[in-house]
Amino acid sequence: MTLSSLSPSLRRRCRPLLPATLVLALAACASSGGLQPQGRLLDADSLHSERTLATSDLAVAAFPASDWWRAFGDPQLDALVAEALAGHPSLDAADARLRQAQAQAGVARADRLPSLSVSGGYTGVRLPESMVGEELGGRYMGSGQVAFDFSYGVDLWGGKRASWEAAVDTVHAAAVDAQAARLKLASGIVQAYVELDRAWRANDIAEQELERARKTVQLVRQRRAAGIDSDLQVRQAEARIPAAQQQLQAAQQQIDAARTALAALLGQGPDRGLGIARPQALDVAALQLPGVLPSELLGRRPDIVAARWRVEAAGKQIKVAKARFYPSFNLTALAGVVAPNVGDLLRSGSTFAYLGPALSLPIFEGGRLRAGLSGADAQYDLAVAGYNQALVDALREVADQVNAVRSLEQQVQSQQQAVATAGSAFELAGQRYRAGIGNYLDVLSAQSQLLGAQQALATLHSQQLLAAARLTQALGGGYAPPADGVAGPVSSSSSVSPHS
């Protein structure tokens, strides 16, 4: 029964009840009260790093350039990075995720717009007389129809706009993630190349040790022939040769492993590594530390920028969840023509139309809307926590690498002195042994000390190169905001306000 089917007097009595009924319906609506996110964005300036970074003697300068690896001065390294960035499965995956986010943003945008569709068809039927009688049965009846269907959901509370904006923010995050993937790949190439350089240095040291061992064996054999030394000294000296050969073989295995790793980072098979020559003499360029940390780091680290965009998207999803608590208004219209014969579709008597505005109001959802809003709040808190953690990790990485660069520079200087001293000791022990005033144990001890000092220096040199590369990566690896300004909001004041 509808209001229009009641008698006029009863309808007059019912009209005053309509406002009261509406008030009761609104009072019974699901409420979002008491639900709000708890996450708060960290202020970068509250994470003090002045004292830690002030102890560094690095020069103050700008952030790294986008092609920072060229500072190592090796054209082969430059070519390898360019080859990797030209096409790698990890980059393809990042680009695919970006296109996926763009497609989802397109869907969210389409949900804000009206929809119009057209349909047409022809229906024919013949029913038996035994079922519908002689009037309709026993003959064929057909009709053709063309209809236009229009639908539009009015965005009264901005929920659809917020959903679209959240999707756009996700696109921004995916675009930054794609840049981060390129930075990670370039950094991986550089670090694998440094490992190849370290393996070649180990190979050089092993060859020098093998040469020293062979010369010592010749000297000991001469002394035994002269009746000065015994077979014991000869066997001790000869034992150094296979040990040096084993070190040489191990270094070659490390060279092969580094080449294979580089081939994989290039997205190629192991044979690609066979064509990678020995690196040139890599050296640490004059490292420079920007004097605008930590605040400027927010816009230079792609992981922080992407995390900030995700916070923005999560905040807008809270608006979407809140909009579901309010009434929604939809407008549907259907118009078209229908006629028994297709040729009669254009006649005025064949038209039909339908208009269906609809207002819906959630009253009882069994807690579904509150659960959805609570989930959106939790997702926002997760995004904020991810952003805060990324910020803390970024400053820790910068501080760690600054400390490493400073310490390794001092360690290399000390170890160079140790190598020089061990080399002098080995030469002196050899001279005394040849002169007959020293023994073979002194030579053996000095030789072992020299080998250890050389190996330690090679390791420290590689650690220096790695620390330089990691510091550059910690400073953003040359990432810069795009020219269109879509770098991402990097201050807490630019955040959406899901707490209101």
Image (cartoon, helix red, strand yellow):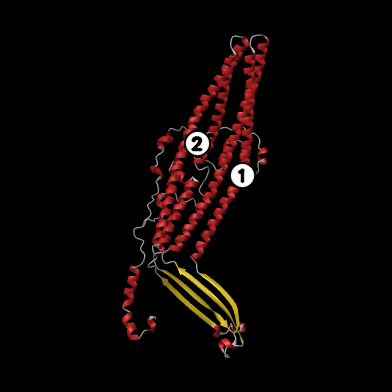
Q: Which residue type does callout 1 highlight?
A: Ala
Q: Would you place residue 478 above or below residue 417 in this image?
A: below
Residue 437 at x, y percent in the picture: 59, 9
Residue 332 at x, y percent in the picture: 48, 73
Of residues 314 and 139, which is closer to you in this image?
Answer: 139
Q: Residue at the location (62% across, 47% down)? A: 86
Q: Is residue 118 visible?
A: yes
Q: Earlier in the sequence, mark 2 or mark 1?
A: 1
Q: Residue at the location (60% across, 29% down)? A: 202
Q: Quadrant of residue 460?
A: top right
Instruction: Residue lying at the far bottom in this picture: please name it.
Output: 134
Q: Residue at the location (59% across, 32% down)? A: 198
Residue under circle 1? 84
Seen in the image, is 493 located left or right of residue 118?
left
Residue under circle 2? 288
SS state under label 2 = strand
Seen in the image, is 239 located left or right of residue 474?
right
- Report how far apart the C-alphas of labels 2 and 1 lie in the structure: 27 Å
Q: Quadrant of residue 21?
A: bottom left
In which quadrant will I find the N terminus? bottom left
SS state under label 1 = helix
Mark drawn on residue 44: none
Q: Would you place residue 291 above or below residue 414 in this image?
A: below
Residue 129 at x, y percent in the picture: 59, 88
